[in-house]
Amino acid sequence: MCETCGCGKPDGFTIHDPKHFHEHEHTHENGHNHTHSHDHESAHDHEHPNEKVISLNIDILSQNNIIAGMNRRFFEGRKVLCLNMVSSPGSGKTTILESTISHLSPSRKLYVIEGDQQTLIDAKRIEKAGAPSLQINTGSGCHLDAHMIEAALTKMEIETNAILFIENVGNLVCPAMFDLGESKRVIVISVTEGEDKPLKYANMFESSHVCIINKSDLLPYVDFRTEEFIKNATLVNHHLEFMTVSAKTGEGMNKWYDWILRLSDQVSGH
Amino acid sequence: MHEFSLAGEVIKLARQEAEKNKALSVNEITIEVGNFSGIEADAFESALSLLSEGSILEKTHLNIVKIKGKGICSACDKDFEMNQRMGTCPICNSFPSEIKGGNEFRVVSLMIEEE
């Protein structure tokens, strides 16, 4: 059984190449409307002469972290820059990627792994923008994990010195915990969200390296105070670097492109 | 929600260790959950009890130990209890400080029944 959601699929996620798309229907006839209760009435009220304590001290995320380490070695071996893009739903990650692809290709080889609960909408948008992409559908899952990326990498022919973007599931909570093997984690926030997001979702801001503040073209119409937001985010992570952009108008995007190119050059040793 | 996939990891881990040690049963499992681990201890407990049905952990007593966050001040180098990821040092009032504890999420031990 899938241990992410108990849906009965062996892995709980599916990978689609948007170029070879056909519909799959998955129904869960014995679906999710049952309850369990556990009463441990007899626990520890009788003798256990053969009891023994095994000391473990094992990190529960260690399995994910081992695979993330393998992914990271894969990227380093191929001199690939991998950026894990995280945000709430609707912050504009896909639009940022579309602009980035049209600006940076064909000078760089770009790839995108898309993570969503369902549909191929984003992968199709990325293909249209001009980069090969794979769509991971997590089903009921709320995040991508290192194992899903490992599985996707076996289906992609990634060239050396390339740049791989992973667009994570739109969610400011769960993806924070899962290292995918990325070189850097990029958090995207839009000015239509609250300035207090970093304080409310501290884990995600704490684990990111760069913060893109998107939709700057809407600043005149919303109450978002950029300085206040940066102050809050810095309280949670004083190493965070900020870029204010509008993926729609292109304002501020050059700083983002330069940052990617600089990092890609570092990774590929140029 | 991610508590479910992590509860699955715990069951896998317990099964491996129980097999390795030829355990008849696992009577207790002790898990540390840090304040900054990103794990909601109650949600994790529910997820584990739901998923453990039919598994090696079905009748196991779950012992969750919550670990408080700890920070160390970059200015005065003292450590202090931190309740949120943004602690200003309570001793010298400086900022920033680095997190030194509270990220734990690990299986500490299993109490097994031997043959």
Image (spheres, coloured by chain):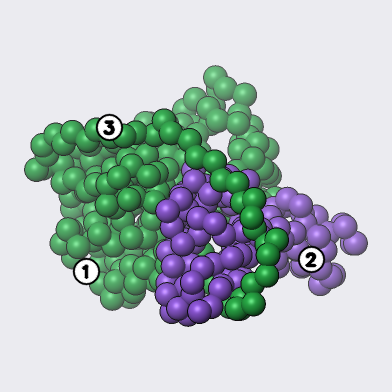
Chain colours: A green, B purple
Q: CA distance from mark 3 to mark 2?
A: 55 Å
**Given the image, what chain letter belongs to the residue carrying mark 3?**
A
Where residue A41 is drawn, which disc sits there?
Answer: none
Q: Position of residue A33 (x, y in %)?
A: 41, 30
Disc 1: which residue:
A160
Identity, as a three-letter code, of the amino acid under mark 1: Thr
Residue B30 vs residue A143: left or right?
Answer: right
Whether labels 1 and 2 belong to a single chain: the reply is no
Quadrant where the C terminus of chain A sits is bottom left
Disc 3: which residue:
A29
What residue appears at the point 16 percent right and 36 percent down from the top-left corner?
Answer: A24
| Residue B81: quadrant of the picture | bottom right
Disc 2: which residue:
B73
Secondary structure beneath dot 1 equals: loop
**Given the image, what chain letter belongs to the residue carrying mark 1?**
A
Residue A121 vs residue A264: left or right?
Answer: left
Q: A77 or B8, which is in the foreground? A: B8
Up/down of A164 relative to A196, above or below: below
Are the residues tagged 3 and 1 within 8 Å (C-beta)? Answer: no
What residue appears at the point 43 percent right and 57 percent down from the top-left corner?
Answer: B55
Q: B14 or A184, which is in the foreground? A: B14
Q: Residues within 10 Å of mark 1 (few under 14, many from 20)?
A: some
Q: Position of residue A181 (x, y in %)?
A: 39, 64
Up/down of A263 relative to A73, above or below: above
**Given the image, what chain letter belongs to the residue carrying mark 2?**
B
